[in-house]
Image: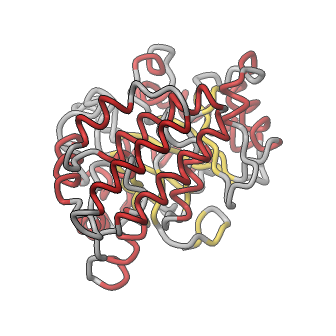
């Protein structure tokens, strides 16, 4: 797929998720079949550039191109400065966050709260595009700020006029947060009124759902978020299904263990021993969600304090599963993910 001046492996995107899409997770998803992975959002507040969190989020060492960095804020000048800062630190695509519904973001009129102020949307987009004229700028939005104000089509036209190269849309309003089911009619309408690539996002948790959303919306790609947590191979499953119309066999137990061990090693290395162990806990929980005996395992695992203990625990857990079969059936996980997304 040609996207923002880059040739991607496919039209499957990893959604930016705070506290999730760090460099280890992005690299893993790309290895498992994602065409592009967008970073967790980086603040536009220059006073925080020196913080450990911001420096980690701006660390793209060894990352497979293209490197897409999402920035968040409500002040056009600060957003322009943030774009320049991240390009200077390795970003090849700048993505603007106007989709996050979190209160701590929206309370400062950033994220999806910006959809209430279309003139400000235009000023921010103009400022960022002009600040990095040689870098592609993309945008992530929701369908509107509440169900009575689904203004995504108008915002999309503002974005196209400003020079935004592609648009991702989550099929909920800001007021919906993550409740209810994503709707795709608004996304389809947006696709019909702009000429830039449009990426559909929201509740895409199976290969069949990915194809259905692409067919319904006419979009250029799909963006996967929560369904990839603990299941990064969903990208190769979707890629295979879109290419062949057939489902891949579930992954081998041994492969899942290998993927998880590699992921944990990257997390421990990236964050350091103490923080790495803490961050790894949620990922281990996601990998084991829905599997036999996982609730008891997670309860014990969350008490472990070292990387060595975590590795020993997952070896034992997956070793027990392997005794019952070489492959894991993930139907139970799919159902749970669909319930979480509903």
Q: Residue at x 29, y 70 (%)?
A: 326
For the question of whether residue 286 can be seen, the reply is: yes
Front-most of 236 and 101?
236
Tell me if residue 5 comes above or below residue 140 in the rendering: below
State the quadrant of the N terminus. Answer: bottom right
Q: How is the image coloured?
A: secondary structure
Residue 86 image offset from top left, x and y in percent: 75, 39
Q: Residue at x 49, y 62 (%)?
A: 197
For the question of whether residue 160 can be seen, the reply is: no
Residue 238 image offset from top left, x and y in percent: 35, 69
**Is 184 left, or right, of 285 in this rendering?**
left
**Is 172 left, or right, of 195 in this rendering?**
left
Front-most of 37 and 28?
28
Residue 203 image offset from top left, x and y in percent: 27, 49
Residue 331 sits in quarter: bottom left
Q: Residue at x 47, y 38 (%)?
A: 310
Residue 178 image offset from top left, x and y in percent: 27, 34
Q: Residue at x 37, y 49 (%)?
A: 316
State the quadrant of the C terminus. Answer: top left
Front-most of 3 and 245?
245
**Going by the picture, which residue comes out furthest to the right?**
88
Tell me if residue 35 comes above or below residue 224 in the rendering: below
**Going by the picture, which residue comes out furthest to the bottom?**
244
Tell me if residue 235 comes above or below residue 241 in the rendering: above
**Is 54 left, or right, of 307 in this rendering?**
right
Number of numbered labels in the structure image: 0
């Amino acid at each position: 797929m040609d996207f923002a001046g880059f040739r991607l492996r496919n039209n499957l995107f990893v959604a930016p998720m705070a506290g999730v899409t760090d460099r280890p997770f992005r690299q893993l998803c790309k290895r498992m079949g994602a065409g592009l992975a967008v970073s967790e959002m980086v603040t536009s507040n220059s006073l925080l550039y020196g913080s450990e969190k911001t420096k980690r989020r701006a660390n793209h060492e060894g990352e497979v191109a293209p490197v897409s960095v999402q920035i968040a804020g409500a002040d056009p000048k600060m957003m322009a400065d943030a774009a320049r800062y991240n390009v200077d630190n390795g970003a090849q695509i700048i993505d603007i966050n106007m989709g996050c519904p979190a209160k701590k973001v929206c309370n400062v009129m950033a994220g999806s709260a910006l959809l209430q102020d279309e003139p400000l949307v235009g000023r921010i987009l103009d400022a960022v595009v002009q600040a990095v004229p040689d870098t592609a700028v993309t945008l992530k939005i929701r369908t509107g700020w509440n169900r009575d104000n689904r203004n995504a089509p108008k915002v999309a036209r503002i974005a196209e006029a400003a020079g935004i190269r592609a648009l991702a849309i989550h099929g909920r309003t800001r007021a919906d947060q993550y409740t209810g089911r994503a709707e795709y009619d608004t996304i389809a309408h947006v696709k019909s009124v702009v000429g830039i690539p449009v990426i559909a996002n929201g509740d895409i948790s199976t290969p069949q759902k990915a194809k259905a959303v692409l067919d319904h919306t006419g979009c250029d790609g799909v963006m996967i978020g929560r369904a990839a947590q603990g299941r990064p191979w969903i990208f190769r499953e979707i890629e295979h299904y879109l290419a062949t119309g057939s489902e891949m066999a579930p992954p081998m137990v041994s492969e899942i263990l290998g993927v998880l061990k590699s992921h944990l090693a990257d997390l421990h290395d990236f964050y350091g021993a103490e923080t790495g162990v803490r961050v790894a806990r949620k990922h281990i929980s996601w990998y084991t969600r829905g599997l036999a005996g996982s609730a008891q395992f997670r309860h014990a695992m969350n008490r472990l304090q070292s990387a060595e203990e975590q590795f020993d625990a997952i070896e034992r857990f997956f070793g027990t599963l392997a005794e019952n079969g070489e492959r894991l059936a993930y139907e139970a996980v799919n159902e749970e993910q669909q319930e979480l997304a509903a």
